[in-house]
Amino acid sequence: MIILNFYVFSKFESKLIKYIILFLSFIYTLIKANTLVSETFKYIFATMDNIERHKPLGVASNEGDTSNALPMGLSFLITFILLMLITLFVTKFWLQQVTQTEIERLVRVAFVSFFVLLVGLETIDSLKELWGRARPYEIGHDGAHFTNWLTINGNTGHSSFPSGHTTDAAYLMFWAFYFKTRVAQKRMFIIAFMFTIIMCVSRLRIGAHFLGDVTMAFTLITLLMIAADYMIYKWNAKHLH
């Protein structure tokens, strides 16, 4: 959204259009970023509580638990401050230092990444609800039992398959598209890939997921990344001719 607004304010002449796009994109980004901030603090507090109570760390993944959530006002305040700092840093030390041609390439990357990731997020969430697979640490409690990854259980209140944390970690691989040179892109991809592997192992280690859960999530995001790479390549090639 930062890249989009930077492009809009540098290319569009209508102030009305500029501020409409700025307002709508800011509200959307604020809401989505606040969800991330809120969930991050919830997991931190829940994990600390689990350690203190000698419970499995993975219990922090339970859905619907708001006992460890930040107050809404504080959560939005933290999110707002973080967004302002990130916007200032990205604008001053990156976007203002590159050419207009590079800005246009970044806008294309941002558009493709946004829509592809949106599809990925909706797909993962839908599969979680449809499969209704219990997590390893839930088995034997409240009637939860083991089912293989091919079994569609329906909406049972469980959401082990596919792994949401693995999905979020794998999204970092899309950052590689924002780098200009192939060398930098490869380095970013390797870093993101290794981080995703670490996330997969950690989710397995704490009993939050089965191997099939993290494997499917990683596979889906990898396929989406291949599709995004193809679309970005085609779009960039079209603008070079």
Image (cartoon, rainbow, N blue to C red):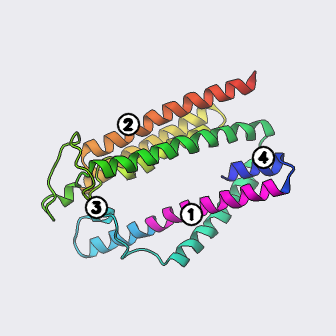
Q: Which residue is mark 3?
A: 58
Left or right position of 55 against 20: left
Instruction: Identify the image quadrant of the C terminus.
Output: top right
Q: Which residue is mark 1?
A: 31
Nearest to viewer (mark 3 / mark 2): 2
- Residue 153 in picture, x, y percent from top left: 22, 49
- Residue 62 in picture, x, y percent from top left: 30, 64
Label 4 packing within 10 angstroms: few (<14), some (14-19), many (20+): few
Left or right position of 42 against 34: left
Q: Which residue is mark 2?
A: 219
Label 3 packing within 10 angstroms: few (<14), some (14-19), many (20+): many
First to last magenta residue range: 16-39
Please report whichever mark, 2 or 1, sits nearer to the chain's N-terminal start: 1
Please report whichever mark, 3 or 4, sits nearer to the chain's N-terminal start: 3
Q: Residue at x 58, y 68 (%)?
A: 79
Q: Identity of the amino acid at label 4?
A: Gln
Q: Residue at x 67, y 38 (%)?
A: 108
